[in-house]
Amino acid sequence: MSINDNTFRKLSIIIPAYNEQSTLAEIIQAVRNVDLSLTKEIIIVDDASTDETRQVIEQLPGDNLVRVYHEKNQGKGAALRSGFTQATGDIILIQDADLEYNPAEYPKLLRPILDGKADVVYGSRFVGSEAHRVLYFWHMMGNRFLTLLSNMCTNLNLTDMETCYKVFRREIVRDIVIQENRFGFEPEITAKIARTGCRIYEVGISYSGRTYKEGKKIGIRDGFRALYCILKYRFISR
């Protein structure tokens, strides 16, 4: 299958958002600026933001834009669960609402699927030679430890299980029920797609991480939850 094969016609981009009024419009414009052969469907899920995020969403123009609003804050996993139910694309891609991940890299992320080599693609911050902002050492070590433990439980050899950029053929995630409401989504979805035996690829991506002062939300509590979820979805929940 070549990259121009029209078997894939639409890309659904799911963007969970919580208090991202300062970056949301910019990331939406960046998504729209990406030149793809696929039609883009953008699904924004506002997870009961307390700032002006909802107003920003309501003012966004354009077709192929789906707006979903949570009345109660539930977490990233819950927002993605809502987004998955709305997605109609042949391929589904997860995009954060901040500016840490660059939509210009969509062609690189999509290529293994469009070429017929992969069913799932992870964008790794730890492979390749793309630009990375230098930030927290222990945050990096935590990510690598969780990825190592996840790999031990799934028998995969990922380098970045916690990455935002995950891309799926729609049929891979269609029947997967997401239980985790917060950042436990990452190890949960990894464990569940590993069980399917599908073809998983990684590509190196750039990363412009935020500081906590700039709005980064994941913390040590989420790290412990991820640790629990790795074990839960390997040994407890099947």
Image (cartoon, rainbow, N blue to C red):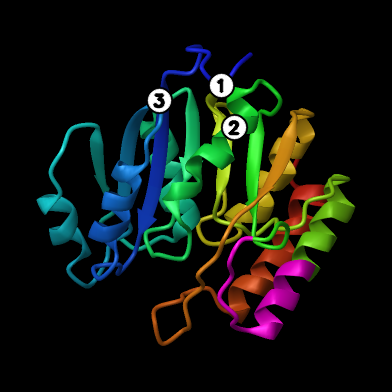
Left or right of 144 in this view: 103 = left
Q: Amino acid at mark 1?
A: Ile
Q: Quick check: 170 above or below 183?
A: above
Q: Which residue is mark 3?
A: 38
Taking depth in this image into account, of 21 and 106 the one nearest to the observer is 106
Q: Judge from the rendering whether residue 31 lies leftward or rightward of residue 63; answer left or right.
A: right
Q: Which residue is mark 2?
A: 111
Judged from this view, the residue extending furthest toward the bottom is 213
In percent of width and height, residue 214 lies at: 39, 82
Q: Residues within 10 Å of mark 2 (few under 14, many from 20)?
A: some
| Three-letter code, disc 3 | Leu
Front residue of this view, candidates 204 and 121: 204
Q: Residue at x 50, y 47 (%)?
A: 105
Residue 84 forms part of the magenta stretch = no
| Marks 3 and 1, how far apart at CA | 11 Å
Q: Residue at x 17, y 68 (%)?
A: 52
Q: Quadrant of the C terminus?
A: top right
Tell me if residue 15 can be seen.
yes
C-beta proximity under 8 Å, tags 2 and 1 = yes
